[in-house]
Amino acid sequence: MNWWQHGVVYQIYPRSFQDSNNDGIGDLRGLIDRLDYLNDGTSKSLGIDAIWLSPIHPSPMADFGYDITDYRDIDPVFGTLDDFDQLLQQAHQRDIRIILDLVANHTSDQHPWFIDSCQPGSDKADWYLWHEENTRPNNWQACFGGSGWSWHPGRKAWYYHSFLPQQPDLNWRNPQVQQAIREVMEFWLARGVDGFRLDVVNLFYKAIDLKNNPTDWFKPARPYDRQRHIHDRDQPEMHTLLKQMRQWVDQYPNRMMVGEIFIADSDNASLPASYCGNGDELHLAFNLEFLRAPFSAAAFRSVIRKWIDLLGHENWPNYTLSNHDVKRHISRYATHEQTLDRARLLAAMLLTLRGTPFLYYGEEIGMPEQAVSRRQLQDPVGKRYWPLHPGRDGCRRPMMWDSPNVFSNVTSWLPETRSEGVTVADQSHNPSSLLSWYRQLVWLRKRTPALHKGKLKLIGSPDEVLAYERCDQQRLLILLNFSSQAQPINLHRHAIDQCLANSQLDAPLFRNGSLLLRPLQALILEISPDFPRRASVAP
Ligand code: NOJ
């Protein structure tokens, strides 16, 4: 089994993890200093197996690194190539793999390729999507607002950008572009990186006839969200390209690609699975449906069931609750008193499902969304749509290491409001903290084959309980009570060999010999092998 299947991945937004040179922005040296926190080989550390780093390449930072000017270097704000090599070496020594963010749908408008492409007669004239007419060719919109087509006065032509005008889209139909990105990938693979997260990978190809997207004029939404994006993404050629990319990557042993499939709503939740092909395209395609799910057992059960069915036997699942584009889940699901219990329950789900869990830095200490005033906004999305959409700064806040925070010795690039008890220092030595719970779950998963590779079977349960078995040599039953009421479970205490993990301090409760799940309780139980298999634990 591969590391990207049994391991736990931890996403780091490098600007916000650890500053080492007192400029208020996180960097690679800072991250190296924190590697022991992530995995020092003992259960005193978090125990993660891989880091996905959001972009670290040179960039004018119009979209904070998702606008690259040089794919083969490190932005000075994060350090140097030497620092990166150090990071790779030190991470590998600790059995931590490194996944880079490959932003290849678009570059920065400051990238030499684009600057070149703007020159009349350039040999890179066809590296981007140009339209040499007086009017825009169609109604395609940019995801971050406005038309997707901007006028370039130098070349006297329109160019297409799926996001900001400073992020022109590459022309993936040009074999030279394919070759250039292949060389970038090989540059990093040869250096030792373990994989890539492919940014908006389903956007690479656009329909060649540039037809208008159909528009629902009555939908109360931004022009971008009123369109059905059938011509500006998800073209069949992408599957051929991914099969090739898979071969480029698989030439190097034990490497992987995880793709972000950009979908506007859950209407086409089946798309991500399609980009895994028959085990011959992406190694993993992000399932981002948990980011939209309401807090209910039924909602999560339905996402899991659908995802398993769509992936089939060849492809491997993955799950994630938070990332750098959405409100942190602890804040999404916050209630007055039960926020922490909910976070503990969701951690138990994420780390016991069959599929690679992706954690987002700070979720292990319950770092909430940071309120950012209009004056403090950095994210271009927030700047354009505030207050309708406050932007993504709130989930990119500096990591809360200690109090006073030691993310940086100077004012950080984003505000950091202290939340009581929400620091690594507060929680590290407290056995009942959220951090200790994450550590317990990650290490339990690591040493328990049923959890990291066993089969998963969803089983019937009371409506507000999510229940599944994970089986290998061992038989485990995971019970997750999403409600604030106790829930009866039809399971006699004699069926339980041992309780491997309990999200709450109180021991499991039995009434007349049968289990009663406490409100918001998560239990991981080992079931006796002799106990007959059942399709349901509903009373
Ligand atoms: C998706 C990334 O997750 C997001 O942060 C970025 O702004 C866009 N792609 C554009 O690259």
Image (spheres, grey):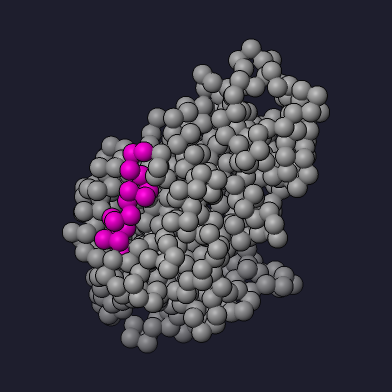
Q: Is residue 151 above or below residue 449?
A: below
Q: Is residue 303 visible?
A: no
Q: Is residue 18 visible?
A: yes
User: x, y (%) of residue 148?
Assistant: 50, 74
Residue 476: quarter of image = top right
Residue 11 or residue 372, whichever sits in front:
372
What residue is shown at x 48% (from left), y 52% (from top)?
427
What residue is shown at x 51% (from left), y 31% (from top)?
451
Q: Is residue 184 above or below residue 42?
A: below
Q: Which residues are magenta?
A: 27-42
What residue is shown at x 60% (from left), y 51% (from top)?
343
Q: Main secondary structure of the magenta part?
A: helix
Taking the view exactly as shown, the residue that stands out farthest to the left is 82
What residue is shown at x 48% (from left), y 62% (from top)?
324
User: x, y (%) of residue 209?
Assistant: 50, 65
User: x, y (%) of residue 50?
Assistant: 37, 46
Decide whether residue 497 is among the magenta residues: no
For the C terminus, the quadrant is top right
